[in-house]
Amino acid sequence: MLFTRHCLGFFLHLCPTERICCTILVFVMKDTTKETLRSDFEKMMRHALQKNGDFGFHIFGDYAASVLNFYVGSSILGLAEKREAALFLASLYNTGINNVINQQDLQEIADVLAQDPTLNYQVLAPIFD
């Protein structure tokens, strides 16, 4: 099977019949990874609320991009799972603000977070305390 293109979890390839076929790959994060994401998110949220009195979207964005890249770099999270993890973090944040972000916007936020190469260790410091 010859893979010819990758796009958002889909691989287009040439089938034996010389038609273009599509294989859908589903990447599912482990429960332990989700728990680590949730636990660290809660630590960061508590820290931001205690220090700044809020956990605004800009703080969340800086944190989420950095933590995703840290997890990928330290092999806690596979690169293929990064987009799903970004959506999970965005959903946690949305839950905390009474679900005011719609699903389409959550998907867009997850896309941006998954593509952001930022890794700021100072932002992550509170999760290691």
Image (cartoon, grey):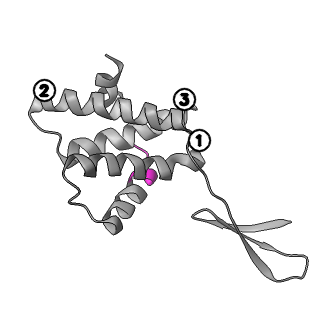
Q: Specify the amino acid type for callout 3.
A: Ser
Quarter of the image with the N terminus in it: bottom right
Question: What span is colored magenta in the figure?
Answer: 113-119
- Compare residues 22 and 121 and report the one nearer the observer: 22
Cβ–Cβ below 8 Å for labels 2 and 1?
Answer: no
Q: How far is the residue under mark 2 from the one under mark 1?
A: 32 Å
Q: Relative to 70, does residue 25 appear above or below in the rendering? A: below
69 in magenta: no
Q: Amino acid at mark 1?
A: Gly
Query: Mark 1 = which residue?
Result: 78
Residue 9 percent coordinates (x, y): 61, 62
In terms of image quadrants, where is residue 108? bottom left
Q: Is residue 14 above or below residue 127?
A: below
Q: Which residue is mark 2?
A: 50
Q: CA distance from mark 2 to mark 3?
A: 28 Å
Looking at the picture, tell me which residue is in the foreground, 118 or 48.
Answer: 48
- Image x and y of residue 13, in percent: 78, 71
Look at label 2 and name its amino acid: Gln
Q: Is residue 3 left or right of residue 48?
A: right
Please tell me which residue is depicted at 35% across the width and 19% down the height of the picture: 128
* CB-based contact (under 8 Å), mark 1 and mark 3: no
Q: Which residue does the image show at 14% across and 32% down from the upper left?
A: 49
Instruction: Give the residue pinned by disc 3.
Output: 74
